[in-house]
Image (tube, helix red, strand yellow):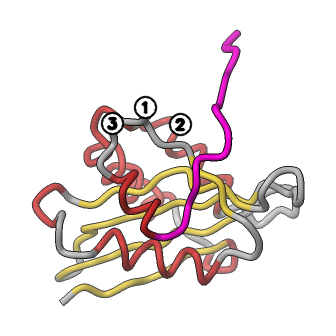
Amino acid sequence: MIKLETLSAIDNATFLQKNEIAEFLFEHLGKYGDPKEDIMKCLDYALDQGLHAGGFVVLAREKGEIVGALVMNKTGMSGYIPENILVYIAVDASQRGKGIGGKIMDMAIKMANGGIALHVEPDNPAKKLYERLGFTNKYLEMRLTK
């Protein structure tokens, strides 16, 4: 049975908890992921008790093991930029197709105050889930990396 749990700044997540989540995301994001150090920075931001940051994590567990994870960061803005950005979501490859991603997303949408933005590669199968949930592709993102 899948059990959902959430973490936010008030939960005082430990390094070990964050590390477990980062390890899971690093492994299961595959080619759509980032280095583990960057995932840890994202978790630090989401679970920071300071006023300048914030967000939350939604986990799906089965028999105590993480089978799905999502990290949402607050942007500190609204209107011209959505209030939240979904940074990471992953489901264990052996658990895909069971609705876990949808359950995690539903919980995150309920928890988020304000709009949500996300970035998705055009070939990422999760794009279909996002579209089913009402996300639209209004803009083309462009970046300058220095």
Tally the numbered discs: 3
Q: Residues within 10 Å of mark 2 (few under 14, many from 20)?
A: few
Q: Which residue is mark 3?
A: 123
Quadrant position of residue 77: bottom right
- Please, what secondary structure does the residue beneath circle 2 have? helix
In three-dimensional space, the C-alpha distance between marks 1 and 3, rounded to whole angstroms, equals 20 Å
Q: Which residue is mark 1?
A: 35
* Region of the chain picked out in magenta, as a range: 133-146
Say which amino acid is labelled 2.
Asp
Asked whether the residues under the numbered discs 3 and 2 touch, taking CB atoms below 8 Å apart as contact, a structural biologist would say no
Work out whether 68 lies above or below 25.
below
Residue 19: % across, % down: 42, 53
Looking at the image, is mark 3 or mark 2 nearer the viewer?
Answer: 3
Q: Nearer the viewer, mark 1 or mark 3?
A: 3
The amino acid beneath tag 1 is: Pro
In the structure shown, which secondary structural element does the residue marked by tag 1 occupy? Answer: loop
Q: Is residue 132 above or below residue 136?
A: below
